[in-house]
Amino acid sequence: FLGKLFQNGMSIVFVVVFARLLGVEQYGIYKLVVVITTIAAAVGLLGMEGGIKRFLALAGKSGEENRVWGIIQVGTALPFLFALLLSAAIALGADPLAR
């Protein structure tokens, strides 16, 4: 409880100080970047974290080492490639988003 209270209090202080240092326009741009990055990070995982845990546990329990390795490879490569594509799309759309 106290940790969450401290975190929320520090967030309020951070927002006030950061907004005063940057100014209204620059702080708005900062928040836009934070929102886009947060959404991209959530979408970039493709919801695979739960599935990876489940299938790794099943494959590990049955002793299928090749399957475990395959799950790790696919679970790492797919989100990475999707995040790369998403990052490229954000970079290409940066100019229209800035307007």
Image (spheres, rainbow, N blue to C red):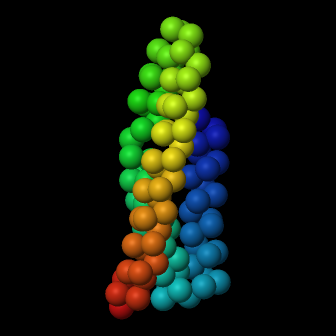
Q: Relative to residue 51, is residue 44 depicted above or below? A: below
Left or right: residue 32 compared with residue 18: left
Q: What percent of the width, then of the height, locates residue 63? A: 56, 10
- Residue positioned 64% across, 58% down in the render: 10
The one of 46 and 36 positioned closer to us in this rendering: 46
- Residue positioned 50% across, 31% down in the render: 71
Q: What percent of the width, then of the height, locates residue 46? A: 39, 46
Does residue 28 show up? no
- Residue positioned 50% across, 17% down in the render: 59
Name the residue at the front extreme: 66
The one of 39 and 27 positioned closer to us in this rendering: 39
The one of 16 and 83 positioned closer to us in this rendering: 83
Name the residue at the top extreme: 62
Left or right: residue 88 compared with residue 10: left
Q: What percent of the width, then of the height, locates residue 13? A: 62, 65
Indicate the quadrant containing the N terminus: top left, top right, bottom left or bottom right: top right
Indicate the quadrant containing the C terminus: top left, top right, bottom left or bottom right: bottom left
Task: Name which quarter of the figure residue 93 lies in.
Answer: bottom left
Q: What percent of the width, then of the height, locates residue 82? A: 43, 56
Task: Name which quarter of the figure residue 69 lies in.
Answer: top right
